[in-house]
Image: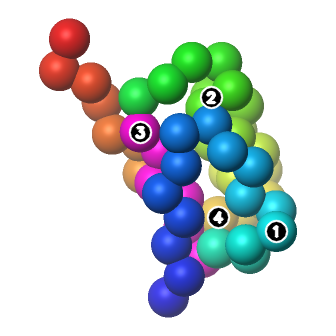
Amino acid sequence: MRLLICAGRHYADSRPDMVIALPGGEDTEELVAQARAAGLQTLSVEGRG
């Protein structure tokens, strides 16, 4: 299984099976939305703040 752990980076070149999104801003939210739209499993890690 290929995983991509991201903090707002684009995933298209790596062709992951799953995206793990760390706390971030609008770029991270957009990446997660794109991953979900592409049918990828996503895991969003919430911050402690």
Q: What colour scheme has been applied to the protein in the rendered image?
A: rainbow
- The residue under the point 69% across, 26% down is 27
Q: In the image, is residue 2 part of the stretch drawn in magenta? A: no
Element on which disc 3 rests: loop
- Mark closest to the chain's N terminus, 4 or 2: 2
- Mark closest to the chain's N terminus, 3 or 1: 1
- Rounded to the nearest angstrom, the CA distance separating label 3 from label 1 is 19 Å
Residue range (magenta): 17-22
Please name the residue that numbered disc 1 is placed on: 13
Q: Amino acid at mark 4?
A: Leu
Q: In the image, is residue 18 part of the stretch drawn in magenta? A: yes
Please name the residue that numbered disc 2 is placed on: 29
- Residue 43 in the figure: left or right of residue 25: left
- Rounded to the nearest angstrom, the CA distance separating label 4 from label 3 is 16 Å
Q: Which mark is residue 40?
A: 4
- The residue under the point 17% across, 21% down is 48
- Residue 37 in the figure: left or right of residue 40: right
- Rounded to the nearest angstrom, the CA distance separating label 4 from label 2 is 14 Å
